[in-house]
Amino acid sequence: MELTYLENVTTLSLTDEKCVGCGMCVEVCPHGVISLVDNKARIDEKDLCMECGACVLNCPANAIEVNAGVGCATAFIMGWLTGKEPTCDCNSDSSGCC
């Protein structure tokens, strides 16, 4: 069973030109979000990303970016856990989330 969190809210991104094809991101991703195709990393299912940051910490080429612990995904999850209105401070008046 694949765990999908929220659609279109993860901060995960990949710069293809920087990827050296080492495969470390594939090895450390707990949800199999990334695969190697023709010796380049590819994001297969972005919505499965839980923004843990393991891929970023293990990418020697700095080809992957994710803001672990920030953004709408974390805001919604923390809102569910705490029972409070989610806020990710991504709008100018900080009154809510994306």
Image (cartoon, rainbow, N blue to C red):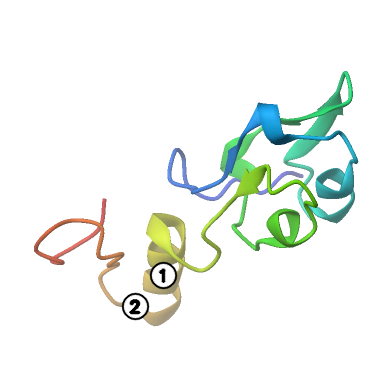
Quarter of the figure with the N terminus: top right
Left or right for 64, reference 58: left
Question: Whole-Å distance between the Cαs marked 2 and 1?
Answer: 5 Å
Residue at the (82%, 33%) spot, across then down: 35
Q: Position of residue 19 (x, y in %)?
A: 76, 34
Query: Disc 1 marks which amino acid?
Result: Trp
Please tell me how many numbered marks the rendered image carries: 2
Residue at the (89%, 41%) spot, across then down: 23
Residue hosting label 2: 83
Within the image, what quadrant is residue 90 found in?
bottom left
Secondary structure of the residue carrying numbered label 2: loop
Circles 2 and 1, Cβ within 8 Å, touching? The answer is yes
> Is 50 or 20 nearer to us in this picture?
20
Q: Is residue 16 in sight in this rendering?
A: yes
Left or right for 17, reference 47: right
Residue at the (72%, 44%) spot, across then down: 2
Residue lying furthest left in this view?
93
Q: Is 13 rendered above or below residue 66?
A: above
> Is 90 or 78 nearer to us in this picture?
90
Within the image, what quadrant is residue 44 found in?
top right
Q: Is 48 rendered above or below residue 92?
A: above
Residue at the (34%, 77%) spot, across then down: 83
Residue lying furthest bottom in this view?
82
Query: Disc 2 marks which amino acid?
Result: Gly
Tag of residue 80: 1
Left or right for 74, reference 26: left
Q: Position of residue 74 (x, y in %)?
A: 46, 64
Category of crowding for the residue at label 2, using alpha-carbon neighbours closer than 10 angstroms: few (below 14), some (14–19), many (at least 20): few
> Is 2 or 23 nearer to us in this picture?
23
Q: Is residue 44 in sight in this rendering?
A: no
Q: Position of residue 32 (x, y in %)?
A: 79, 43
